[in-house]
């Protein structure tokens, strides 16, 4: 799915089959959060931000391939800064573990809020925010929860995400309606092309993972 919500371009790729996602609401949540990180970091010009939904195995693959850890986690963010000699443009890539949201959500504020929190946290990291100390972690979490409260007031969190019955594992994701809302089998070639572009950026960009 490619959404031109001003600047930057937002791309959402669904690469998991355990969670049903309301594509329209997820797009709106991502747009809202990106608006906030642009206010936090107004000096950064974003060309594109990609959100990839994965499961436990998918996040482990990213974690082991780029961060040298074989453990699962909730979200991984990559920021690719401008390459010298190229126009000022930055790229962000966020891998969100939808399966982790399904597992952890019932213990907290529900699956939808948990998934939205991962999106918010991943975007927050794109600003350069660090949560390595309790103080920094608490500061990030406070503003992320503010963003989620705003999303909730707009009605974006209700039924954003829910478990997908096994019988529906190959069914279209809620919100797709046959259009280019989420990546499905007809868009497999597009997804491969997006992956290839992201792979090239990982090797060419001077920035590293957060």
Image (cartoon, rainbow, N blue to C red):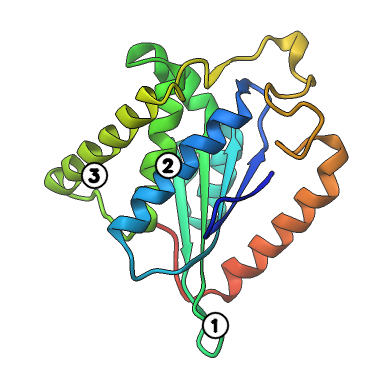
Q: Position of residue 102 (x, y in %)?
A: 49, 19
The residue lying toward the viewer, choosing from 94 and 208, is: 94
Q: What element carries label 2?
A: helix
Work out how far the residue at label 3 is from the one at label 1, CA to CA, in angstroms: 30 Å
Instruction: State the separation of the CA atoms marked 1 and 2.
Output: 26 Å
Pair 2/3: label in front: 2
Residue to which mark 1 is pinned: 87
Tell me what residue is drawn at x 60 percent, y 24 percent.
22
- Where, by quadrant of the figure, is residue 181 drawn? top right
**Residue at coordinates 17% horizontally, 49% vertically from top-left?**
136
Front-most of residues 108 and 42: 42
Quadrant of the drawing holding the C terminus = bottom left
State the residue position of label 3: 140
Quarter of the picture containing the N terminus is top right
CB of mark 2 within 8 Å of CB of mark 3? no
Which percent across, then down, holds residue 184?
79, 35
Q: What's the CA distance linking mark 2 and mark 3?
A: 16 Å
Residue 81 in view (yes/no): yes
Say what secondary structure mark 3 lies in: helix
Q: Considering only order in the chain, which callout, 3 or 2, is on the residue closer to the N terminus? A: 2
- Of callouts 3 and 1, the N-terminal one: 1
For disc 1, the neighbor class at 10 Å (few under 14, some 14 to 19, many from 20) is: few
N-terminal label among 1 and 2: 2
Query: Of helix, strand and loop, which one carries label 1?
Result: loop
Q: Is residue 78 above or below residue 119?
A: below
């Amino acid at each position: 799915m490619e959404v031109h919500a001003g600047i930057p371009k937002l791309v959402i790729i669904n690469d998991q089959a355990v969670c049903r996602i309301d594509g329209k609401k997820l797009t709106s949540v991502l747009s809202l959060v990106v608006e906030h990180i642009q206010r936090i970091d107004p000096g950064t010009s974003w060309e594109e931000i990609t959100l990839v939904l994965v499961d436990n195995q998918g996040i482990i693959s990213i974690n082991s391939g780029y961060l040298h850890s074989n453990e699962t986690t909730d979200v991984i963010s990559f920021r690719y800064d401008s390459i010298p000699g190229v126009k000022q443009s930055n790229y962000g890539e966020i891998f969100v573990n939808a399966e982790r949201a399904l597992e952890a959500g019932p213990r907290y504020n529900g699956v939808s809020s948990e998934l939205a929190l991962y999106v918010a946290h991943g975007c927050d990291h794109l600003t350069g925010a660090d949560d390595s100390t309790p103080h920094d972690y608490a500061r990030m979490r406070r503003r992320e929860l503010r963003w989620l409260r705003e999303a909730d007031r707009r009605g974006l969190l209700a039924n954003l995400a829910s478990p997908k019955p096994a019988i529906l594992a190959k069914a279209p994701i809620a919100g797709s309606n046959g259009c280019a809302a989420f990546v499905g089998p007809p868009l497999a070639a597009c997804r491969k092309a997006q992956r290839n572009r992201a792979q090239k950026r990982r090797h060419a960009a001077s920035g590293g993972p957060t």
